[in-house]
Amino acid sequence: MSFDPATRISQRVRQLQPSPIRRFFGLVESMPDAISLSIGEPDFVTPWGTRESGIFSLEKGYTRYTANLGIIELRREIAAYLRRRFDVSYDPQTEILVTVGVSEALDLAMRVLLNPGDRVVIQQPCYVAYPALVSVAGGDPVFMPTHAENSFELAAEDFDRALAESGANVALIGYPNNPTGAILPRERMAALAEVAARRDVVMVSDEIYAELTYEGDPVCFASLPGMRDRTIVLSGFSKAFAMTGWRLGYVAAPAEIISAMNKVHAYTAMCAPTMAQMAAVEALQHGEREVAMMREDYNQRRRVILARLRALGLSCFEPKGAFYVFPCITSTGLTSTEFAERFLMEHRVAVVPGNAFGECGEGYVRCCYATALPLIEEAMARMGQFVASL
């Protein structure tokens, strides 16, 4: 009897769609002359002091497993950073878990919070992994659309309505936002916090782009009144510290939740890479100057790409955080997918169709400006030629 391995793959995984971001990344790799504005990865090399600390750890033979939660030196530095930067306190012994990137942190959060069929309300547009990991954990995502005319800010009344209609007791938000670059002002966050407390909701807050905020100070959701004990904060080192390949994230949450997450973490990842953890200690102790320098460079690119897009006649919300712009391309008469595919094939520039981030992202494309300014200028020149040809 012949055997078909495909028939043994779970229904949940069969229904999971491959990441559209990685699809465009793969296409770009086969086009050496293409410019990629598709992947959210800093073009900066990890600062030398951080790299040197990783090298030193190897030279000293620090190559063994660490504690499942992560080395205590790093957990102490993370706790000190959160207290210093966001005025929120965690016990490094029991309330911080070091993970293999923020993706693992998100996966763990969904696994420990959800029973089969539980619903999770998620703002959209949103990072492609949010609904995917909710589904993998057995939950059902419920979407709360946001729109450019409201600065892609999630309104408390929409949040309240989504919770009431869905019966969800978990919510997942991400500000600064990927893909829109939107931030959520403190007063808007406080309004969401009031709803979360009244509805008895656990908040999962993805704050990986918090350091890449260009107007005002970033806000940690857990720092809002009454939110510390009902919030799971996800963050890491990939974006602001230019450490994507080091694969290092962390979770800050009440001890009971960290303990539950660590159960799963211990059976899967076991621990984050030792040399990456050593490097992250250095990044938190001495890397603030480099982070500020990179943030200012991104800010310059943000202003340039926004001005160029608007000069092309494309309506574009002004991003206030992360390193993405989300221009509206409906005036071209193309769908998001048509625009992205044709722009890549005809002009060798990769962007991501907005519908990859949810249905309300249709009519937009995401452009990442975490690449060199000359390449951004050239990409915008090519976009001008493309739009004119339509």
Image: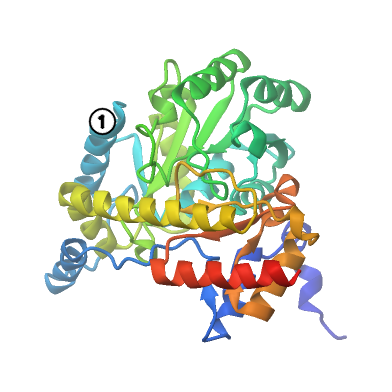
List the residue tagged with mark 1: 83
Q: Position of residue 13 (x, y in %)?
A: 72, 60
Quadrant position of the N terminus in the picture: bottom right
184 relative to 345, above or below: above
Residue 174 falls left or right of residue 210: right
Task: Report helix, strand or loop for mark 1.
Answer: helix
Q: Residue at x 46, y 55 (%)?
A: 267
Q: Position of residue 231 (x, y in %)?
A: 47, 29
Of the pair 196 and 155, the residue shown nearer to us:
155
- Residue farthest along the right direction in this orientation: 1
Give the quadrant of residue 252: top left
Q: Amino acid at mark 1?
A: Arg
Q: Residue at x 57, y 50 (%)?
A: 179
Residue 308 falls left or right of residue 14: left
29 relative to 318, above or below: below
Of the pair 88 and 334, the residue shown nearer to us:
334
Q: Residue at x 61, y 67 (%)?
A: 384
Give the quadrant of residue 60: bottom left
Q: Position of residue 331 (x, y in %)?
A: 75, 55
Q: Residue at x 75, y 61 (%)?
A: 10
33 relative to 180, above or below: below
Residue 36 falls left or right of residue 347: left
Badge 1 density bin: few <14, some 14–19, many ≥20, Cα 10 Å? some
Q: Is residue 239 visible?
A: no
Q: Position of residue 71 (x, y in %)?
A: 24, 50
Number of residue marks: 1
Q: Is residue 77 visible?
A: yes
